[in-house]
Image (cartoon, rainbow, N blue to C red):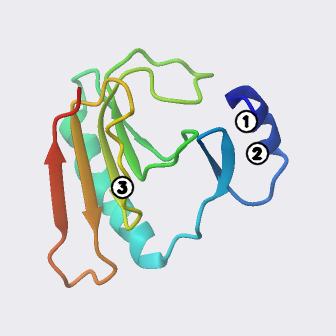
Amino acid sequence: MTIDEFLEWENLREHRYEFLSGQPVPVPPSTQARSLLISDIVSILRPAVRGTGLRVRCGSEVRYPAVVIDTGPYVATATEPTQPFAVIDVDRPRDWSALPGVQFLSLVTGDDPEEVLTFISARTK
């Protein structure tokens, strides 16, 4: 299956899927705690990047991270970031280092909002 075939296929589905290693993989449902944490991350990042040319995006890629900061040009029809700078995922640990152009890789986890969050930052190639 190609990415274009996947995007057509997924548009006909009720639930979200990711496209990994040429195969559609179901995206687990989000919890309220995860959704709230993602909202908090976006509300902090958006004002921080305003006026810089950077954009904060929420999971609309073929792989669905919680948040992407994209430094590339805005392309209204794009299905993936044009030049991703940072990726933040919540409660779905994955290796995002294969995503071309990511300079910082972040992972935030935690179901209990009272717990201290784990934050991993790494430069990728």
Label 2, residues with CA under 10 Å away: few <14, some 14-19, many ≥20 = some
Query: Which residue lies under the disc numbered 1?
Result: 7
Mark 2: amino acid? Glu
Of residues 13 and 123, the one nearer the viewer is 123
Query: Which residue lies under the disc numbered 2?
Result: 10
Badge 3 marks a residue whose secondary structure is: strand
Direction top: furthest residue = 73
Mark 3: amino acid? Asp
Locate residue 94, reporting x and y percent.
38, 54
Of residues 18 and 51, the one nearer the viewer is 18
Q: Earlier in the sequence, mark 3 or mark 2?
A: 2
Q: Residue at x 68, y 45 (%)?
A: 23
Q: Earlier in the sequence, mark 3 or mark 1?
A: 1
Residue 98 falls in which quadrant of the image?
top left
Q: CA distance from mark 3 to mark 2?
A: 21 Å
Mark 2–mark 1 contact, CB under 8 Å? yes
Query: Which residue lies under the disc numbered 3?
Result: 89
Badge 1 marks a residue whose secondary structure is: helix
Q: CA distance from mark 2 to mark 1?
A: 5 Å
* Above or below, comparing residue 39 to residue 6 in the picture: below
Residue 111 falls in which quadrant of the image?
bottom left
Label drawn at residue 62? none
Label 3, residues with CA under 10 Å away: few <14, some 14-19, many ≥20 = many
Q: Residue at x 36, y 62 (%)?
A: 90
Is residue 54 left or right of 68 when viewed as pictured?
A: left
Is residue 22 left or right of 60 when viewed as pictured?
A: right
Mark 3–mark 2 contact, CB under 8 Å? no
Is residue 106 left or right of 39 when viewed as pictured?
A: left
Locate residue 99, reporting x and y percent.
39, 32
Of residues 86 and 50, the one nearer the viewer is 86
Q: Split into 4 quadrants, where in the image is the C terminus?
A: top left
Badge 2 marks a residue whose secondary structure is: helix
